[in-house]
Image: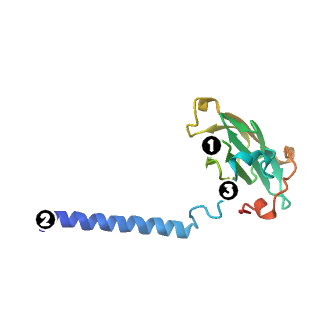
Amino acid sequence: MKIDRYEKIWMWASGAMLCAFFATMAGAAIGSSIGPPSHVQTIDPQKVLSDPLFHQQGTWVDRGGRVHATIVATAFAWLPAQLTLPAATPVTFHMTSIDVLHGFEIVRTNAQATLIPGYVSQFTTQFAPGDYMIVCNEYCGVGHHIMAAKMAAIPRSQWRPTMAAPDVPPAHENGHDSH
């Protein structure tokens, strides 16, 4: 089969561009230690509220003094509906969904996660002082538009956790999978 010279040039150029894109992505992932989630923590969606980590929802401090927030998404509501966190302090969020796919987003921040029933989503971030809105950014049903919660970031000296630390293994507290 005869391939035109210009078609060969475009095929080689396209192949070279794909190789360059792959090398750039691989270099960025390796250089920044970015990778897919590992040690994915699973949870039975029907037993979320009886799990030691999710039995209560709110904020707590682990044995190492790190701040955590435990949040559950359910049909058109966030548990808890109001959250107060210490400003300028790293906070590790532990979240899951009981029913369907939900998108967790704290408006005006980089805090976002997809909550999938059966999996625990987790990330750590910090906030400037102020009031924030938590919304669901994945369509989850007819009441999706009312699924919102409030969050306030206040000075650490004024902040108090809303619950005692759950009875979870130390690996949970450090943000690693314990299952």
The x, y position of residue 141, in whole percent, is 58, 33
Residue ID for mark 1: 105
The x, y position of residue 57, in whole percent, is 79, 44
The x, y position of residue 117, in whole percent, is 64, 47
Q: Is residue 171 above or below residue 81?
A: below
Q: Nearer the viewer, residue 77 or 160?
A: 77
Residue at x-position 72% and y-position 39%:
130
* Residue 167 shows in the view: yes
Callout 3 amino acid: Thr
Callout 2 amino acid: Asp
In space, the residues marked 3 and 1 are separated at their CA atoms by 21 Å
Name the disc covering residue 4, or none.
2
Other-residue count near label 1 (Cα within 10 Å), few / some / many at <14 / 14–19 / ≥20: some
Other-residue count near label 2 (Cα within 10 Å), few / some / many at <14 / 14–19 / ≥20: few
Quadrant of the rendered image containing residue 66: bottom right
Name the disc covering residue 42, or none.
3
Between discs 2 and 3, the one toward the N terminus: 2
Q: Nearer the viewer, mark 2 or mark 3?
A: 3
Whether the residues at callouts 2 and 3 have beta carbons within 8 Å, the answer is: no
Between discs 3 and 1, the one toward the N terminus: 3
Residue at x-position 65% and y-position 51%:
118
Q: Nearer the viewer, mark 3 or mark 1?
A: 3
In space, the residues marked 1 and 2 are separated at their CA atoms by 51 Å
In space, the residues marked 2 and 3 are separated at their CA atoms by 54 Å
Quadrant of the rendered image containing residue 74: top right
